[in-house]
Amino acid sequence: MDIVLLVIGIELVWLIVKGWSMADAVLRLAPGALLLLALRAALTGLDWRWIALALLASFPLHLADVVRARR
């Protein structure tokens, strides 16, 4: 999973180099990264609050991405 997070970080840099704004790139990638962190927390046995926090944080970012993409 850490490799996937590294790939997401590399993709973020690549998108910015390609001309995406920082906000667009982060809104596109952050929800998936947070879901991955929630999965990692669940698989490593962290408290359910950490899992819920990552899931809860991913939802508004996803909605912001959808709204931004519709414009």
Image (tube, rainbow, N blue to C red):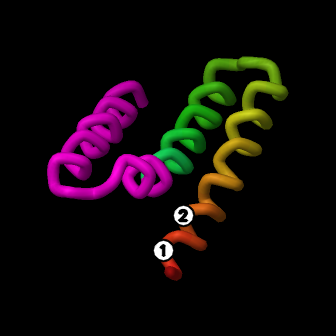
- The residue lying toward the viewer, choosing from 21 and 12, is 21
- Kindly check if marks 2 and 1 are in contact, taking CB atoms under 8 A apart as contact: yes
Please state the extent of the stretch shown in magenta in the rendering. 1-28
Residue 29 appears at what percent x and percent y?
Answer: 44, 50
Q: Residue furthest left?
A: 18
The residue at the point 70 percent across, 54 percent down is 60
Residue at the (28%, 37%) spot, across then down: 7
Q: Can you say whether 49 is above or below 39 in the image?
A: above
Q: Is residue 27 magenta?
A: yes
Q: Which mark is residue 56?
A: none
* Residue found at the very far bottom of the displayed protein: 70
Location of residue 51 by image quarter: top right
Residue beneath disc 1 = 69
Tag 2 residue: 65
Rendered position, 9 above or below 70: above
Q: Residue at x 34, y 40 (%)?
A: 8
What x and y, as percent, mark residue 5? Answer: 39, 33
**Relative side of 52 to 26, left or right:** right
State the SS at label 2: helix
* Mark 2–mark 1 distance (CA, rounded to whole Å): 6 Å
Q: Residue at x 69, y 54 (%)?
A: 59
